[in-house]
Image (spheres, rainbow, N blue to C red):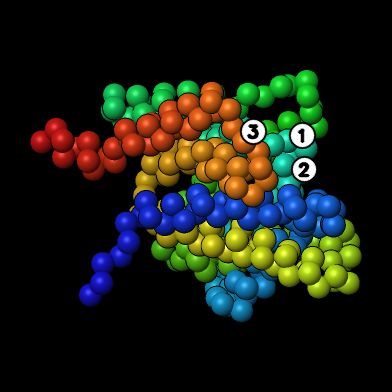
Amino acid sequence: MPRRPPPHAYFVVSALFHYLGPAFAVLLFAHLDVLGVAWLRIASAAAIFALWRRPWRMLRTARAPERLLLAGWGATLATMNACFYTAIDRLPLGTVAAIEFLPVIVLAALGARSSRNVAALVSAVAGVYVLTDVQLAAEPVGLAFAFANAALFALYIVLADRVAKHPAIGGIDGLAAAMVLALVCITPVAGAQALPAFTDPVVLLAGIGVGVTSSVIPYVADQLALERLPRATYALLVALLPATATVVGIVVLAQVPSAVEVAGVGLVVAGVALHREPAEVTAAHR
């Protein structure tokens, strides 16, 4: 029987696509309203999940608490994506990524049970601080949406973790249901802004591609990782995302980092490398 890939491998896939899709979305902003791009992302992902997993069957048999959990996750996905796209329309992708990590520090800190993990967290936080380089007066609206997105991203991790480990829902089936519910939430706000895409096949196909690379591949990888990783460990691994965003910004958007930003990436990677799983820590003290 073939061995399953380690959960960290799934996270690497998620980290790669987490900002690759949004980087392509930035290129779409010249052709479509920001919220229209967000709607296309969620709608295309919801359609794929509906055809693949048929989540209405699970929703029909789910109990009220499970439906409430999925509805909350769907509303979080819709609001988070709208805030995120509004933020990256006004700020560099790497800056938004660094802000996005800040509330996640709390989730990682809750699981820091050893001095080694505390040191890992300090290194990762220092790296994010170096990467941030935020000018608070530069773009207040963009920053407001970036911080709102950050809070929602932390909530996303909490809810995604609950769904991934919920015995009655099932990670990917729960994700499929939440994405369909996210489409219901975002359509009244952003559906009209996406209408011009239906008269331009290139923009429509690009929007579908953003949905696949932003909401299908990384979210499925998140569920496969969270199924086997403690939430705090996953939260610390999220520190890799600002580094990933920096690399994607270079390749796709030509946002070349400074030497200081490269040093920040190094601190983040060092923090993740230093971190040890709770099981590893226990074994080391036996």
Query: Is tag 1's residue or tag 2's residue first in the polypeptide sequence?
Result: 2
Residue receiving disc 1 = 142
Query: Is tag 3's residue or tag 1's residue first in the polypeptide sequence?
Result: 3
User: Which residue is rendered at x = 37% and y = 51% of the image?
Assistant: 8
Badge 3 crowding class, 10 Å Cα cut-off, few under 14, some 14 to 19, many 20 or more, is many
User: Which residue is rendered at x = 54% and y = 58% of the image?
Assistant: 219
Which of labels 3 and 1 is toward the front? 3
How far across and down, in percent of the image, does residue 266 sit? 43, 31
User: Which residue is rendered at x = 51% and y = 38% of the image?
Assistant: 243
The amino acid marked with disc number 3 is Thr
**Is 237 situated above or below 161?**
above
Drawn side of residue 258 relative to residue 4, left or right = right
> How far apart are labels 3 and 2 at the CA level?
12 Å
How far across and down, in percent of the image, does residue 254 sit? 66, 42
Q: Is residue 43 visible?
A: no
How far across and down, in percent of the image, does residue 143 sit? 73, 31
Which of labels 1 and 2 is toward the front? 2
Badge 2 crowding class, 10 Å Cα cut-off, few under 14, some 14 to 19, many 20 or more, is some
- In the image, which disc is placed on residue 52? none
Residue receiving disc 2 = 89
User: Which residue is rendered at x = 29% and y = 27% of the image?
Assistant: 116
Residue 137, quarter of the rendered image: top right
The amino acid marked with disc number 2 is Asp
Residue receiving disc 3 = 95
Residue 272, quarter of the rendered image: top left
> How far apart are labels 1 and 2 at the CA level?
8 Å
